Image: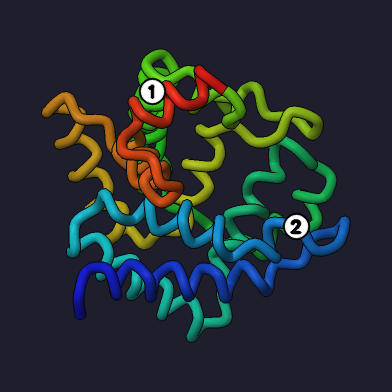
Amino acid sequence: MKREELIFEIVKIEWDMFQRVHNTGGRASCQDDPDTFFRMRMSQWAVYSDDLLKSYRKDLEDAWNEGRNFLFEKYGGMMKNTFPEEYEEIRDILPAVSDHARAVIDELAAIHVEWDREFAQKYPHIRENGRLFNSRDDSAWGGVSSETYFREEAATYSERTLEFLEKEMKEAKKNGENLLSDMIACEVAFYGYKSLDDAEKTLLDS
């Protein structure tokens, strides 16, 4: 299977899971916007190795066979800081995350936030309407932070996939790379921009 096909297959399963998430306030508008969903999610997975992608696809397949929904679990976990009363109603059906996995996620979340702040400093106009940075700033009115989103998504990964993620993120950081910036570069390319600099300049001039 070609790499592009593998990424598309992953995002297709995620989209199918997303369609089965039921919000208390009714269906979310983003659940009717596959174009944006596919661009964002394919951009995210494009920066990782084939080994990580294959591992995560196995996670998705196992979850589907077990009746689990990673998108429900991710958004459910996010509610802990934004809608705590509703979170209490579902917390018992969310899978437990091991202490080891939590420790790894803590480390990787710190790297993620550092990358996010670096990106915001270099490309303020692209980042302008993005999420808040830290979990401590989560609220019902301000939404879920970039840190919390990362944490709750990573919490759905198997320890095998998390091991790949840890290796690749730490290696990228050691080499002075910013995988979050690489993801957004893929995303703006989907919208026709030549580069992040091109997108930043266009937004600045608009």
Callouts 2 and 1 close, C-beta under 8 Å:
no
**Horizontal relation, residue 54 to residue 106: left or right:** left
Query: For residue 173, which quarter of the picture?
Result: top left
Quick one: label 1, few (<14), some, or many (20+) residues within 10 Å? some
**Residue occupying the far bottom of the picture:** 65
Image: 129 above or below 33: above
Nearest to the observer: residue 201 or residue 184? 201
Residue type (three-letter) at the residue carrying disc 1: Phe
State the quadrant of the C terminus. top right
Instruction: Quickly name the residue at label 2.
Output: 29
Rendered location of residue 102, percent (x, y): 42, 43
Image: 116 above or below 59: above
Quick one: label 2, few (<14), some, or many (20+) residues within 10 Å? few
Q: How many labels does the image show?
A: 2
Query: In the structure shown, which secondary structural element does the residue marked by tag 2 occupy?
Result: helix
**Residue occupying the far right of the picture:** 25
Task: Please name the residue shown 60% across and 60% down the image.
Answer: 73
Query: In the structure shown, which secondary structural element does the residue marked by tag 1 occupy?
Result: helix
Rendered location of residue 87, percent (x, y): 75, 49
Query: For residue 24, which quarter of the picture?
Result: bottom right
Instruction: Quickly name the residue at label 1.
Output: 119
Q: How far apart are marks 2 and 1 (CA)?
A: 27 Å
